[in-house]
Image (cartoon, coloured by chain):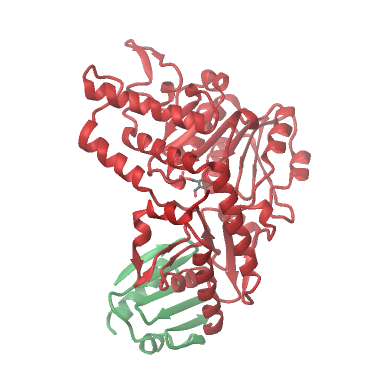
Chain colours: A red, B green
Amino acid sequence: MFDVEKIREEFPVLKRKINNKKLIYFDNAASTQKPKAVIEKIKEIYENCYANIHRGIHTLSQELSDEYENARKIVANFVNSNFEEIIFTRNTTESINLIAYSYALKNLNKNDEIIISVMEHHSNILPWQFVSKKVGCKLTYVSLNKDYKINVEEFKEKINRNTKVVSITHISNVLGSINDIEEIIKISHENEAIVIIDAAQSAPHTKIDVKKLDADFLVFSSHKMLGPTGIGILYGKKDILEEMEPFLFGGDMIKDVDFYSAIWNDLPWKFEAGTPNIVDAIAFAEAVKFLENIGMENIEKYLNELTKYFLDRFSELRKFKLVGSRNYKNRAPIFSFIHDYLKSHEIAKLLDLEGIAVRSGYHCAHPLMKYLNLFESGGTVRASLYLYNTKEEISYFFDILKKIENNY
Amino acid sequence: MKLREICGGAFSLKFDKEIEIEKIANLFKDYKIVIKNEDSIKLSKKEKEILIFKYGEILFYNFKKDEIFEILEIIKNV
Ligand SMILES: Cc1ncc(COP(=O)(O)O)c(C=O)c1O
């Protein structure tokens, strides 16, 4: 059973007061809070068993090396991939950059095309602008349908035999839309393009099975799913990763180094140059275990209930407009909205005074804001929920929005 | 006073105490008052908007950094 009160007990920060009010943390799409298991793991390692990994003969180094590789195993199981297909990076952004540098720059030429969508986060736009400029290839955008999802019909029209890379988000960090990635992956493969899925918002919300999805790459960040900052995941199909050149060069990613040449290490270490973020990778595995103990299906079901409740309550408002789908079945609990004349930061400030943390502005998605004509007006307010949020918090949140409606 | 640039084309100027919103609003004589209540005053002039909160914060929209620095100099002396 999903016991939200029991879950909340695990998050010390939820006891905090902000402006003398109980903290309501609705900024989960930016980053989530951390459970005791994660916090304590970090403390435990630094207090009891810290050392550098992979290179030591001594006990501490060997113990921690085993824990680090076990963390990789836990993450691999979490997304149903093979061990050697999981590379630890710093975050989603670095994972996408790694693909752009090590795959796209090497494999694309000026006749090729890259397809992304207008709803991408900057971290899934800028690397492709860079590749496109560097190799002189075309960068094509797919727009949205009336449900605020990537328009698959338009995608079908735009993809062609020159398309070599399709890089899209699974769940929008602004609109909460869940894209039809299975179909997009299938169409991409029929056109012999490789597909990168930005799962930064979906890995926290739903069960990911990379084998079933058949994406070539899938990327996400630990900090958006209860884990520490500084750890990201790059999943890549083994045969593609093997063909790729390393991204960074240095210690640990080699088998042997000569004066003028080197032999790269096996996967996944070929892509992990230098001392990795050992402690946070291990702590991330604790976050994954925490999620798995609750069950991703249960989490998804609970978040769907919150989504439905939030949307029902939203329809009571008069001066606020939702930017995104009203269909709770087809979206994640990430809600963007605007006020008739107050700016997004003003709303966020007024909410902060009541202890509610939301984000305001462009959400690292300037092109989407421009596409939706929300750029000039300063973007949207975004409330994003996660597994420790409750209907009572949502109810209080709407009480405050109504108070703002009355006062402004 | 602490000035922060925030995402969405805005600046926040935070004070460590409550501020007299009317007194600050009077500094912007050529602005129109669009909202006024106990806790805040919102001013606007074309695309520029200023929201002054009594608890000690001012939000500026569509200002350039140099313009903000000029305003800071004036506010400092109030
Ligand atoms: C959809 C999406 N992609 C990528 C990112 C970038 O994640 P990170 O900052 O962890 O690299 C984010 C973060 O907000 C996101 O929401």
Extreme-front residue of the structure: A1
Badge count: 0
Q: Please tell me in which quadrant of the rendered image residue A110 appears.
A: top right
Where's residue A342, x and y in %? 54, 75
Q: Is residue B6 above or below residue B71?
A: above
Residue B76 in view in this figure: yes
Q: Is residue B60 left or right of residue A173?
A: left
Where's residue A313, x and y in %? 61, 69
Q: Residue at x 42, y 41 (%)?
A: A287
Where's residue B77, x and y in %? 27, 82
Q: Is residue A353 above or below residue A385?
A: below
Residue A93 in view in this figure: no
Closer to the camera, A64 or A172? A64
Closer to the camera, A355 or B11? A355
Q: Is residue A58 left or right of residue A172?
A: left
Q: Residue at x 33, y 32 (%)?
A: A278
Q: Residue at x 40, y 76 (%)?
A: B58
Q: Please tell me in which quadrant of the rendered image residue A132 appears.
A: top right
Q: Residue at x 47, y 40 (%)?
A: A293
Where's residue A251, x and y in %? 32, 22
Closer to the camera, A97 or A200? A200
Q: Is residue B35 left or right of residue A8?
A: right
